[in-house]
Image (cartoon, helix red, strand yellow):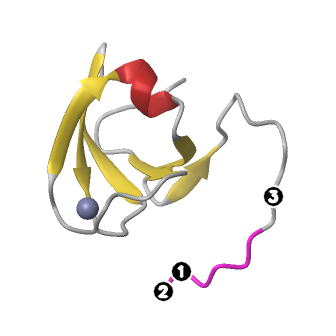
């Protein structure tokens, strides 16, 4: 999975604060992510986070997550 620093990840499971979106602070064997809901940082092995990724945004554009081939249309008003 192609994930770079400063990408914004939308997760399947929410953080306890309710936030679903995380900014990548460091990408590699271990990830360091910052919750955009509460600002808390977490670190952990890449595989653990990859399983939970629903979508990736880079420069405001959505990037296809290779593992999910199913296309979903969501009508979330995003601001
Ligand atoms: Zn949070």
Residue beneath the point at 37% across and 22% down: 46
Which segment did they paint magenta?
74-79
Does the stretch in magenta take in 14?
A: no
If the image is split into quadrants, where does the N terminus sit? Answer: top right
Q: Are marks 3 and 2 in contact (CB under 8 Å)?
A: no
* Residue 31 seen by the camera: no
Residue beneath the point at 43% across and 54% down: 59
Mark 3 burial class by Cα count in 10 Å: few <14, some 14-19, many 20+: few
Quadrant of the rendered image holding ligand 1? bottom left
Q: Position of residue 67 (x, y in %)?
A: 70, 28
Q: Position of residue 14 (x, y in %)?
A: 43, 59
Q: In the displayed structure, would residue 39 be above or below residue 22?
A: below
Q: Within 8 Å: ligand 1 and the Cβ of disc 1?
A: no
Q: Position of residue 10 (x, y in %)?
A: 48, 53
Q: In the displayed structure, would residue 35 be above or below residue 27?
A: below
Residue farthest to the right? 70
- Residue tagged 3: 72
- Residue tagged 2: 79
Q: Does residue 21 appear left or right of residue 17 in this picture?
A: right
Foreground residue, 21 or 61?
Answer: 21
Q: Does residue 69 appear left or right of residue 63 in this picture?
A: right
Mark 2 burial class by Cα count in 10 Å: few <14, some 14-19, many 20+: few
Q: Does residue 52 appear left or right of residue 67 in this picture?
A: left
Residue beneath the point at 60% across and 85% down: 77
Q: Are marks 2 and 1 in contact (CB under 8 Å)?
A: yes
Q: Does residue 75 appear left or right of residue 25 in this picture?
A: right
- Residue tagged 1: 78
Does the stretch in magenta take in 78?
A: yes
SS for dot 3: loop
Between discs 3 and 1, the one toward the N terminus: 3
């Amino acid at each position: 999975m192609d994930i770079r620093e400063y990408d914004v990840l939308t997760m399947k499971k929410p953080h306890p604060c309710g936030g679903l979106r995380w900014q990548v602070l460091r990408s590699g064997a271990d990830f360091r992510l910052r919750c955009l809901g509460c600002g808390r940082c977490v670190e952990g092995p890449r595989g653990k986070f990859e399983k939970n990724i629903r979508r990736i945004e880079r420069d405001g554009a959505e990037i296809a997550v290779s593992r999910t081939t199913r296309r979903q249309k969501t009508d979330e008003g995003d601001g």
